[in-house]
Image (spheres, grey):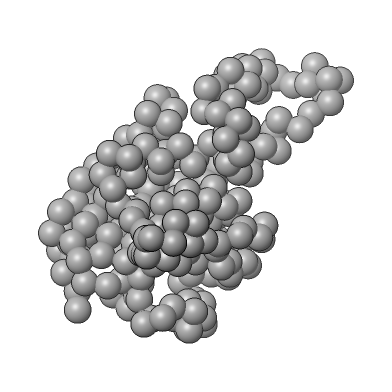
Amino acid sequence: MAWRGGSCRRLAGKCLHTTAGFLKKTGTEHQWLQRHLKDPFVKATKVQHYRCRSAFKLLEIDDKLHILRPGLAVLDCGAAPGAWSQVAVERVNALGTDPALPTGFVLGVDLLRIPPLEGAVFLSQADVADPATLRMIQSLLSNEKVDVILSDMAPNATGIKELDHQKLISLCLALLDLSKSILKPKGTMLCKFWDGHDSRLLQNRMKEQFQDVRTIKPQASRKDSAESYYLARLYKGK
């Protein structure tokens, strides 16, 4: 199944219009672009040099719940264009910026190309559900396991809400299965989902494997978006 990182690449592409091209856009596209340009998180992205506004979703979650700490190993699934990896590099001290703190590790995976990022290792054009990718991931980890799995990935959208919801839930379930191979005991998993009738199925499956599962809707998520996140903590696996 095809999947990609967050929606930022699509959003960025929409903004790269000439004035003439902009004038030809439909009313809906015009409204979207106006909202995008006024978005405070878009403006903050430029000021703070993040690759995408989605960085502020992870920053908000981590500020409140402290899932990223110096010294942790992190797997970022659907990493392109790399905004969540940027946050993870900062929060786990992957660059060793503070020598008094443990140095962490950040590994990002995406079907698309991920531009290089200092402090992170990327597997571009790699399917996280492919056994060969799992072997590469494990070979790059000191003990073949990570402390935190992050996922802002989503399938290529069809425009059919229920079908897209089901496809994303399937991706999350596949990632949950992957966690059995690479997540440390008491580890953490954060994954995006789109609301729908299969959300409870994913939540129940996560509760089987984690002691604490909660639903989070960051302020940086647009109010009209169906996206939310499941944060699962204290992995029960061995």
Query: At x 74% / y 21%, what residue is drawn?
Result: 25
- Taking the image as shown, residue 86 lies to the left or right of residue 10, namely left
Q: Which residue sits furthest right?
A: 20
Could you tell me residue 120's position as x and y percent?
A: 55, 63
Could you tell me residue 19's position as x and y percent?
A: 83, 20
Query: At x 57% / y 35%, what residue is drawn?
Result: 48
Query: At x 57% / y 52%, what residue is drawn?
Result: 82
Could you tell me residue 219's position as x and y percent?
A: 37, 29
Q: Which residue sits furthest front?
A: 100
Q: Is residue 7 visible?
A: yes
Using the image, determine if residue 180 lies above or below residue 25.
Answer: below
Using the image, determine if residue 46 lies above or below residue 156.
Answer: above
Q: How many marks?
A: 0
- Taking the image as shown, residue 187 lies to the left or right of residue 207, namely right
Quadrant in which residue 149 is drawn = bottom left
Using the image, determine if residue 127 lies above or below residue 70.
Answer: below
Using the image, determine if residue 136 lies above or below residue 151.
Answer: below
Q: Closest to the observer: 53 or 119? A: 119
Q: Which image quarter holds the C terminus? A: bottom left
Query: At x 60% / y 43%, what residue is drawn?
Result: 51
Could you tell me residue 56's position as x and y percent?
A: 45, 37
Q: Closest to the observer: 131 or 46? A: 46
- Taking the image as shown, residue 148 lies to the left or right of residue 225, namely left
Q: Is residue 159 visible?
A: no
Q: Closest to the observer: 70 or 138? A: 70
